[in-house]
Amino acid sequence: MRAQSIDKFRIICLMIAVAIIFIALIGINAYSAKLQFEINTLNKQIQEHQRNIQNLEVKIKSASNINNLEQKALDLGLVYPDFDAIKYLEKTEPIEEFALALKEAIY
């Protein structure tokens, strides 16, 4: 009699353990699905940001096109310098002192 009650107790404990394991597996699966959804959402956001970056790079390249810059300068009233306003530097001067030489030539 006692052996049968111990066996019943063991079977009940085993069934509870199996139920807990199944519940844990379901919980892990649900958490995994949630994480996968968040990963997919983040990947979509990354792709959207990459498209925006590419669009901005195209806009930067088109805005910095020499023809556009020249037209904007002309619209602002800038003109090419006259021939007598051009200053030439000698090649004997070192590159490090280019700004200084240019400043001296202008002033």
Image (cartoon, rainbow, N blue to C red):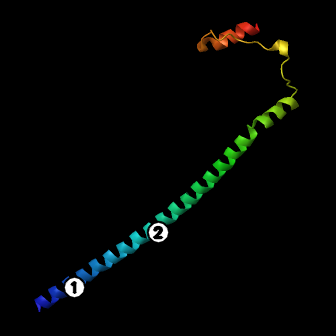
Tag on residue 11?
A: 1
The image quadrant where one finds the N terminus is bottom left
| Position above or below: 69 against 2 | above
Decide which of 8, 18 is in the foreground and name it: 18
Per the image, label 2 sits on a secondary structure element best described as: helix
Q: Which amino acid does label 2 sit on?
A: Ala
Q: Is 10 situated left or right of 24 in this image?
A: left
Q: Which residue is drawn at 43% across and 67% down?
A: 32
**Residue 95: image x %, image y %?**
60, 15
The residue under label 2 is 33
Q: What residue type is labelled 1?
A: Ile
Alpha carbon distance from label 2 to label 1? 33 Å
Decide which of 93, 46 is in the foreground and name it: 93
The image quadrant where one finds the C terminus is top right
Tag on residue 44?
A: none
Please tell me whether mark 2 or mark 1 is closer to you in this view: 2
Q: Which residue is drawn at 11% across and 89% down?
A: 3
| Position above or below: 106 against 15 | above
Q: Are marks 2 and 1 in contact (CB under 8 Å)?
A: no
**Residue 19: image x %, image y %?**
32, 79
| Position above or below: 73 against 82 | below
**Residue 104: image x %, image y %?**
71, 7
Nearer the N terminus, badge 2 or badge 1?
1
Q: Which residue is drawn at 54% across and 58% down?
A: 42
